[in-house]
Image (spheres, helix red, strand yellow):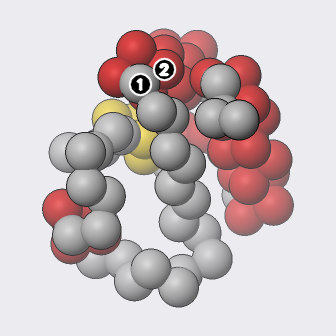
């Protein structure tokens, strides 16, 4: 069963809590293909522990998650 927005939000909040719980220090974004554009923009490697990615399955779900972290938590918007 695909993750719903609330499941993705919970996963990301748990991850941020493990690696530095200040949401304002994190960037959030959406991408159709996260492999190259997101990783290159942030100079990350796939194996880095602080990077997290979840498949939202719908554009509306992805948008909902992104807006939650930007509007409600103060995270920065990624490229």
- Looking at the rendered structure, which numbered label has been put on residue 68? none
Front position in the image: 11 or 58:
58
Q: Quadrant of the C terminus?
A: top left
The residue at 35%/23% (across/down) is 59
Secondary structure under tag 1 reads loop
Label 2 vs label 1: CA separation? 5 Å
Q: Position of residue 20 (x, y in %)?
A: 72, 58
Above or below: residue 45 compared with residue 68: below
The residue at 18%/62% (across/down) is 37
Q: Position of residue 22 (x, y in %)?
A: 67, 44
Secondary structure under tag 2 reads helix
Query: Which residue has dot 1 on it?
Result: 58
Q: Of circles 2 and 1, which is in front? A: 1
Q: What is the tally of numbered marks visible in this picture?
A: 2
Above or below: residue 22 compared with residue 18: above
The residue at 50%/44% (across/down) is 55
Front position in the image: 70 or 2:
2
Query: Which residue has dot 2 on it?
Result: 61
Front position in the image: 35 or 71:
35
Residue 53, visible in the rendered structure? yes
The residue at 42%/46% (across/down) is 27
Crowding at mark 2 (Cα within 10 Å: few <14, some 14-19, many 20+): some
Crowding at mark 1 (Cα within 10 Å: few <14, some 14-19, many 20+): few
Q: Name the side, left or right, on which 30 lies relative to 67.
A: left
Above or below: residue 72 compared with residue 28: above
Residue 9, visible in the rendered structure? no
Q: Quadrant of the N terminus?
A: top right
Tell me where residue 12 sits by quadrant: top right
Which residue appears farthest toward the front when viewing the image? 1
Label 1 near label 2: C-beta < 8 Å?
yes
């Amino acid at each position: 069963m695909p993750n719903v927005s609330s499941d993705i939000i919970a996963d990301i909040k748990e991850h941020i809590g493990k690696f530095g719980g200040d949401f304002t220090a994190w960037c959030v974004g959406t991408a159709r293909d996260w492999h190259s554009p997101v990783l290159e923009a942030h100079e990350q490697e796939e194996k880095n522990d602080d990077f997290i990615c979840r498949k939202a399955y719908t554009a509306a779900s992805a948008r909902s998650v992104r807006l939650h972290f930007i509007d409600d938590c103060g995270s920065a918007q990624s490229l």
